[in-house]
Each structure stands twice: as structure tokens, then as C-alpha cells.
Image (tube, rainbow, N blue to C red):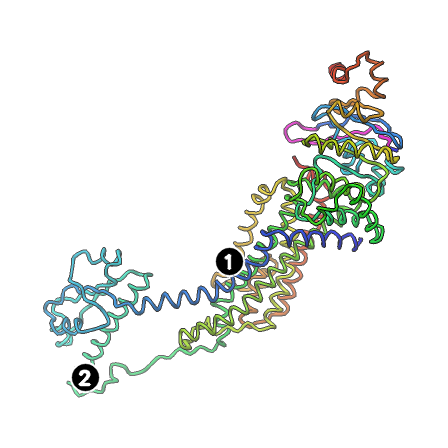
Amino acid sequence: MIEALHLVKRFHDKKRGTVCAVNDVSFSCRQGEIYGLLGANGAGKTTTLRMLATILTPTEGTAIVAGFDVVKNAQMVRGRVGFLSAATALYGRLTAQEMVEYFGRLHGLDEDTLRERMEDLFVRLEMKEFLDRRCDKLSTGMKQKVSIARTLVHNPSVMIFDEPTLGLDVMAARTIVKFIRECRESGKTVVFSTHVMSEVEKLCDHIGIIHDGKLLAEGSLPDLRAQFGIQDLEDLFVKVVEA
Amino acid sequence: MSLRNIGIVYRKELIDSLRDRRTLISMIVVPLLVMPLLTIGMGVLSVALVGVAMREVPRVMILGGDDSPAVLAELNKMKDFEIVPSRPDYAEEISNKKIRAAVEIPAGFEAKLAAGESSTVKIYMYEGELKSGFGADRLQKFFSKLRDRSVREHLQARSLPENLAHPFDILETNVAPPEKVGGAVLGGLLPYFVILLCLTGAMYPAMDLTAGEKERGTIETLLCSPVSRTHLVIGKFLMVLTAAVATAILAITSMALSFGAGKEMLLSITKGASDPALQITITAKGIISIFFVVFPLAVFFSAALLALSLFAKSFKEAQSYISPLMILVVMPAIASLLPGVELTPVLAWIPVLNTSLVSKEIISGTFHWNLIGLIFLSSSIYAGIAITIAVKLFQREDVLFRT
């Protein structure tokens, strides 16, 4: 379960002064659901998700993630969240196995549990053939699999994806979409951000349209279509943003 | 404080760094190469160059002396130099290295010599040019001998004892132990390189583990883990310190070994010449003491480099921050090489300069334990401040996510 409660994030920028990247954003996502944050570049999606993953601290407001407050119990939240984004790269000089192992240890797994989890993930993700290869020598698809294994090694109950398919080819993007769907099927709470409308249509149970740091519209896709009287999601998005 | 978490981060950073060619070069290859090159290489090279210069028969020019045929004949007979015909542009010839030196014999030189009158023989040479110096030296020796012979002949003609012109000798005797003399010559230079290598050894991993992570996008991956940021930065700091200490240990060991080997080699080449620089013996006590004073400096360097490069958003930006730091380190280290700069309790508080000065003393066999203790304390304080800054910076979002 994720519950964002009036999240605000302000930055100080030398040229622009104080910038409000996220302005009073509240939404919730229940267990076994996918919540999609839809917005253009610079809308505040990444900042919102980074606050949920406790990588950034909110200036105001808070969020309850997996039962813990992101401000008061950041470490507890991190232990229960898997965060994957286009910016979460791999250590190029570690092998695929070492990468997953490292994050398993950072999450405090004991050696037996870690071996078990890794074995399970490596089989499920078909990673066996490239486990000993350094991450910088892997193809984009292989890297995606390592990243997925890295986010799942501690078996998180909440998954946060920040534009996970950005810059990926069709095949690698499909792997990610399939993986997000599997997360929902296994009962995880999933929040993900994107500006790709087709992904939203394919995956999301609930959608939040974010622009200039504000959450402008929220609901299930059928609800939003009914509310604005527009079937095409792209047209709907433009109407909400321009209003 | 979770030692387990720090250990996990440290272990990963160590594996990662040991697989990085650039870190290996700065941490292992450079210190292992610099010291032998500096001692054996430079020593052998300078001995070889001096040997070549000494073996050369210098071309010298004689100006005037037409009325002194006996002196000219004697000069022409000498095998120590080759006489070339006189030309008015002798100074240019010396500058262009066509001849090594020139000697101007004054008019009526022989006649004045015979009459016991004073005159001046001028030798022209290019100051600072080794081969020109050797040419002038040989001319100087020739005319010194001629002067001594002339004095002797005049004294004999007057039935006076020879030592009348040389009533006593002056003998300067050194009471300083040979290693101290050597310490003054090389003692400043070698620790200077150890300190510099210690900094360069830490430099690359510090940039790679911070600005490098930001640039490659792995910092965000790392921050997703539940390990506290303090533990993350301490794990990283320990890796940078490992690189600095490994570089320092390798540099100090390489310095001691190559100096020992270089000394033997140079002594065999110079056939036991008593150059004070060759009299240094770097003892195990000296090595341990240098390490003792260099260690807190390595901690200071590691934390300062980590904090500085943490601030940068890319590897290139980190390099631009660190370059001025190099100057800040080089300046006090060079100041310690200046003659007359001696270690005092006040200077013991100036980072780098204090370590440089005390290492110089240690190499020359002087152990001022109170000052060594004071330097350890001051460097430790600076190191503590630098670590605190690095830890604080790692908590700041505006530093970690600078765009």
C-alpha cells in the first residue's frame, strides 16, 4: 500500500530561485494494483517517485509506504521497496551475479536466503548464461534483467518504476512491461511513471496526470474517459494539461 | 554504526577498484616505478652523463699569447684538450657549443712571469654547462700548475724554502654523520614524492567512487538500498584510504629498496666515491616512523578528496576541483625543501609541510618524538574534520543530485 499525503518538494536553483517541483500531491495505491503517474518531462514524476522511494526527503507532507512513514522511517521503507528507473544503472565492473549479491547483502539478507533468492531469480529471468559476465559487457536486454533481479532480490512488497522503458528497444521494453504485470499478479503494490500512453493503457489500474508539480486529474482509465468525455488517452492528457 | 554494512560497501568498492586499470596504475604501478626511476634511474643517468662529459677532450681556443711561445707550445702538447685556431667570436663559439672554453693570455705574459710581475689570465666558459665547466677546469689546472712552478723557480733562484708561498693548509672536517649529510641532500626529496604519490593514489578512486558514480548513474541505485548514507560514505572512504595507504606503503618500500640497490650500483660505478647522498641508509625504524606520520595525512587526503569530488557532478568536474588541491599540496611540500626551513612546534600544525619536514629529519636519522607526536595529532585533527565534512556532504540532496 502506498499513500502519498500532500507531498511537496522545493529546490533551490541558482538561476531560478526556489522551484516547487512537486506541489501538494496526494494519491493512494492499494496492494496488487498498478498506479501510473502520467506526465510530460519536468512535470514532477521523478521527484514524486524519489520521495516515495526515500531517495529524496519531502519539503512538506509525507507518504506511507508499506506501512512506514517515508520521513520518519526511511530505512524501513527502503527495505520494502524495489526502485527501478532509467537512471538506476549497474556497476559495470561487477559481474551480473556480484551485482545482485551486493544488493542482497545491502538489504541485510543472510547468506542462505540470498543464495535461495538468487537461484530463483536467475532461473526465472533466464540469467544463468551471463552470470559471470561483467555488467558493462552485457546487452541492453541482459542489463534490464540484472536490474530487475537487483530490485527483486529482497522480495519487496512495493515496486516503484520511474520511466523504466525510457531509451529501450521494443524487446527490452516488453520485458519490463511483462515484469511490471508479474509484480501486480504476485500481489505487489506498483507505482510507475511514464509519458508513453500505450503503457498506461496496457498496465494501469489507476492513473494520475501530473503537470507542473500538481496532480491535475486522477482515477481509473474508464472513469477519466467518462469524466472528460474523451476516449483517446493522448487527447485526454492534453486536455487536462491545457486546462 | 554497522560494521557489517560498512564492510559490505568496502568489499564491493575494493573489488570494483581492483578491476579498474586506472586505479591500479595510480595505486600500484606508479609508486613502484617512480622511486626506482628517481633513485637508480636518475643516479645512473647522471653518472653516465657526467662520465661522457668527463671523457670528452674539450676543444678550447687560445686568445693572444703570440709573445709567449713556450706557454703556447706547452699548451699544444697537452692531450687534455684540443686547441682550435683563434677567432674573435669566441664567446659565440662557446655559447653554440662549438668550443668548450677559451683562454686569453695577456701580452708579455712570459716576460712578466720571468720578471715576477703580476698578470691576469682570463678563462671564458659557459656557466652551468657541464662540458664547458670541464674544459675551463682543465685550463684552470694547467695555469695553476704553471703558476706554482713559476713560484717554485723564483723561490729556488733566491734560495728560499718552497713552503714560504704556502705556509699552512686549511682543512675543513665534517662532524655530521654521513647519513645526516645525505639526509639533507635527498631527505627532503624522497618524502616529498611519498606524499605526492599518496595523494595521487587516492585521487582516482575518490573521483571514481563519487563523481564517477553520479556520472554513470549508479549513485541512485545505491541510494535505494536501506544502508544508511553514513555507512555508504565510510565504506567508500575506507576504499580511498586503502588506495592512499597502499600507494604510500609501496612508495616507501620501493624507496627503501631502490635506494639500497641504487646506492650499491652507484658506488660500483663511481668506485666508492664519497658523495654524501650515497651515504644514506634508510632503516626499518625510519620506514615505520615515516609511515606513522604519513598515515594521518593519507586519511586527511582521502577524506578531503572524497568530499571535493562528491561535490562534482561528473568525473571531469571533479578533476577541475582537485587540480588546485594538487597545488595546495605541492606548495608546502616544496617549501620543506628550501634551505633553512626547519621543523618547529608552529610549523608542526601546517599540514603537508609538517609531514614533509619531519620525514626529512627521520631519513637523516633525527627523531624528535614530541614533534612527531604533535604532527600525528594535528594531521589526525585535520583528517577528522575532512571525514566529518565528507559524511555531511553525503547526506545533502543538493550535493548528491546536483544537475
Q: Are marks 2 and 1 on the same chain?
A: yes
Query: Please, what is the dominant secondary structure of the magenta stretch?
Result: strand
Chain letter belonging to callout 1: B
Does B39 sit left or right of B239 as displayed? Answer: left
Name which quarter of the figure residue A242 lies in. top right
Q: Tell me which label, 2 or 1, sits earlier in the chain.
A: 2
Check whether the beta carbons of the residues at disc 2 and disc 1 lie within 8 A of each other: no
Q: Is residue B249 magenta?
A: no
> Quick one: A23 or B121, which is closer to the camera?
A23
Name which quarter of the figure residue A67 lies in. top right
Mark 2: secondary structure: helix
Residue A64 visible in this rendered orientation of the protein: no
Chain letter belonging to callout 2: B
**Kind of residue at badge 1:** Ala
Numbered badge on residue B335: 1
Name which quarter of the figure residue A180 lies in. top right
Q: Which residue has dot 2 on it?
A: B155
Residue B181, percent from left and from top: 48, 72
Does A116 sit left or right of B273 as displayed? Answer: right
How far separated are the C-alphas under marks 2 and 1?
Answer: 54 Å
Residue placed at 74% from the left, 48% from the top?
A: A97
Residue placed at 10% from the left, 69% from the top?
A: B67
Mark 1: secondary structure: helix
Magenta extent: A2-18
Crowding at mark 2 (Cα within 10 Å: few <14, some 14-19, many 20+): some
Residue B190 visible in this rendered orientation of the protein: yes
Say above or below: A88 vs B354: above
> Quick one: A152 or B304, which is closer to the camera?
A152
